[in-house]
């Protein structure tokens, strides 16, 4: 295995690891599981930094790959979905994930112009970026069967799945009325509000 190929695989692994960390951290932020441990601003800053790191590693991965002598990828094959004949499905997912990651990272800098709701919708697509990158890595990687890569792929997928389930169940709970969650809503006193907590004491 050439040094060049090791750099290609290393940058790809680093990109996926950073993307996995960004996805996991984003789910922790949105589910507010770390709200009592870390302040909101550092949490968001760290999430943004992980996304940038994933994008930079991916761009480096693409740049080195375009100069590989054995595979002979052209920029068109790397940047246009389904243009590559080598493992077309895996490469296509990698290309689409690159564009999706670029959009998600770029949304940090136009958030005030597009609004919170649109920003959240764009960020929700990061789950698709993670899934596409996961399949791309498993299908295109030459070391997919190594224990380290199996641990990285399965571990990150399991954590993302669990946090996503927790996030969705939490959103469902917040969207229900108190009675649907098993707690009856408070009832006002029959004679109206009381200063002392008991209507009889106000007469």
Image (tube, rainbow, N blue to C red):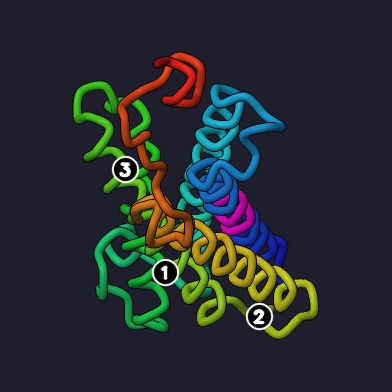
> Mark 1 = which residue?
132
Residue at 53 percent of width and 74 percent of height: 70
Give the vertical position of 116 relative to 77 (above or below).
above
Indicate left or right for 156 with 41 as reference.
right
> Mark 3 = which residue?
120
Residue 110 sits in quarter: top left
Q: Position of residue 117 (x, y in %)?
A: 24, 38
- Judged by depth in the image, the label closer to the viewer, 1 or 2, is 1
Q: CA distance from mark 2 to mark 3?
A: 32 Å
Depth order, front residue of 75/38: 38
Depth order, front residue of 196/167: 196
Residue at 72 percent of width and 74 percent of height: 1
Q: CA distance from mark 1 to mark 3?
A: 19 Å
Q: Earlier in the sequence, mark 1 or mark 3?
A: 3
Answer few, some or many: residues within 10 Å of disc 2's Cα (few below 14, many 20 plus, some between 14 and 19): some
Residue at 76 percent of width and 81 percent of height: 146
Give the vertical position of 142 relative to 30 (above or below).
below
Q: Earlier in the sequence, mark 2 or mark 3?
A: 3
Depth order, front residue of 183/112: 183
> Mark 2 = which residue?
144
Task: Read off the magenta span.
Answer: 15-21
């Amino acid at each position: 295995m050439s040094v060049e190929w090791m750099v290609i695989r290393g940058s790809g692994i680093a990109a996926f690891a950073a993307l996995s960390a960004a996805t996991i951290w984003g789910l922790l932020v949105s589910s507010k599981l770390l709200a009592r441990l870390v302040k909101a601003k550092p949490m968001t800053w760290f999430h943004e930094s992980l996304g940038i790191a994933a994008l930079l590693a991916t761009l480096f991965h693409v740049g080195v790959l375009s100069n590989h002598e054995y595979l002979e990828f052209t920029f068109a094959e790397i940047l246009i979905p389904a243009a590559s004949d080598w493992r077309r499905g895996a490469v296509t997912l990698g290309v689409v994930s690159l564009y999706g990651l670029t959009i998600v990272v770029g949304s940090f800098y136009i958030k005030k112009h597009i609004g919170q709701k649109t920003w959240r919708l764009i960020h929700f697509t990061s789950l698709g970026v993670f899934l596409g990158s996961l399949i791309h890595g498993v299908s295109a990687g030459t070391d997919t069967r190594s224990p380290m890569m199996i641990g990285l792929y399965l571990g990150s997928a399991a954590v993302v799945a669990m946090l996503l389930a927790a996030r969705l169940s939490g959103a469902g709970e917040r969207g229900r009325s108190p009675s649907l969650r098993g707690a009856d809503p408070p009832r006002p006193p029959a004679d109206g509000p009381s200063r002392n907590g008991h209507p009889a004491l106000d007469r």
